[in-house]
Image (spheres, grey):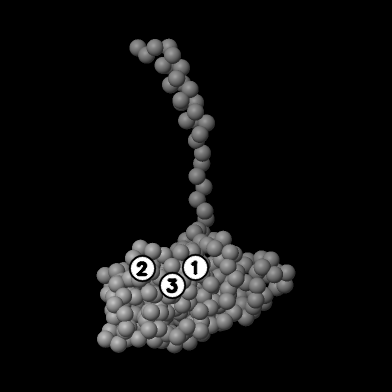
Amino acid sequence: MLPFRSILVLIALASLLVACQFTFTPIPTPTPDVSITAQSGVTFDPQPRGSIAVPANGSRWIQVTYPSNAAADLMYFEVTGADGILLEFYNETGTSLRLVSRSETLFANSLSRLNALTPSAALSDVDVTSVGIGYQCIGPCVAAPYVGSTRFVRLVNETNSNRNNVQLFAYATEFDDELEPNDTPGTARTYTVTFTGDGPSGALEHVNDRDFHTIQCGGGFPFGDLELTLRAGAFVGDIVLIANNVVYGKDERSLSVPCGATVEVRTLDGTAAAPGTSTYSIVAD
């Protein structure tokens, strides 16, 4: 038989457990105000899939279906035709916010990170050799690795005026960065520098994009090791170069690294942009 004191302890613990009980209420899937299907195929020339009115200081939900598409790398959602719109891109059930954007030149994986930055109004002025057309959105947009799925988007009108004709774009693209896939050290692309100021380039086209480059020294390069500088033009996210486990910010020259080193470019703040803005180059000296 348990001692009387032990019985009291058990009663107290049971009472505490009862007091701590709570009811979990799941977040409901939103009811869409309009449903659309993404543009078929792969394109860098998207066409509207519909339009919607968003009242002053109000919001509207869109359900968008991205069909299975083996040729696609990225799923885009974009809006045009109105300023003051915050674009929120959610998961398959509309219960988890994944991406946010207010402009054509920046998106992020959280509102707090987006609020901390002022989007650039200019396209990147970085000289690049591995980015194709330098695709650019013309309104707030987000991009994520393509998954055939149904997603939810919420448009928030942050102004005191109605937005009566917001154009909706949902489409698939390929990577504009021609060195993709290079998201791991094992898939790093090799670039041989042949003169000072030479170096590889790329673009960060979604928030988890990581680009690895192996930089060799060619016969015309005058040094036996490398000092590297990351140039990122108009991109305002926290883009960094990682070489020999040291993190360098934009325009910061690295310590010497050996020829043949593999380096990484990524963002630390969950930001990215269409490649017209998110292009970068690594300059070797």
The amino acid type, in three-letter code, at marker 1 is Asp
Position of residue 157 measured from the top left corner of the image (x, y, whole percent) = 65, 69
CA distance separating discs 2 and 3? 11 Å
Label 3 residue SS:
loop
Kindly identify which residue carries mark 3.
253
CA distance separating discs 1 and 2? 16 Å
Residue 98 visible in the snapshot? yes
Near-viewer residue (96 or 40): 96
The amino acid type, in three-letter code, at marker 3 is Arg
Question: Which is nearer the N-term, disc 1 or disc 2?
Answer: 1
Near-viewer residue (93 or 9): 9
Position of residue 209 measured from the top left corner of the image (x, y, whole percent) = 40, 70
Near-viewer residue (257 or 155): 257
Question: Which is nearer the N-term, disc 3 or disc 1?
Answer: 1
Task: Name the quadrant containing residue 262.
Answer: bottom left
Locate the C terminus and report the quarter of the image it occupies.
bottom left
Kindly identify which residue carries mark 1.
238
Task: Name the residue: 52% across, 55% down.
Answer: 28
Task: Name the residue: 46% across, 77% down.
Answer: 231
Kindly identify which residue carries mark 2.
243
Task: Name the quadrant containing residue 182.
Answer: bottom left
Question: In this rendering, is residue 17 above or below 39?
Answer: above
Q: Is residue 249 left or right of residue 217?
A: right
Task: Name the residue: 43% across, 67% down.
Answer: 248
Position of residue 281 measured from the top left corner of the image (x, y, whole percent) = 42, 79
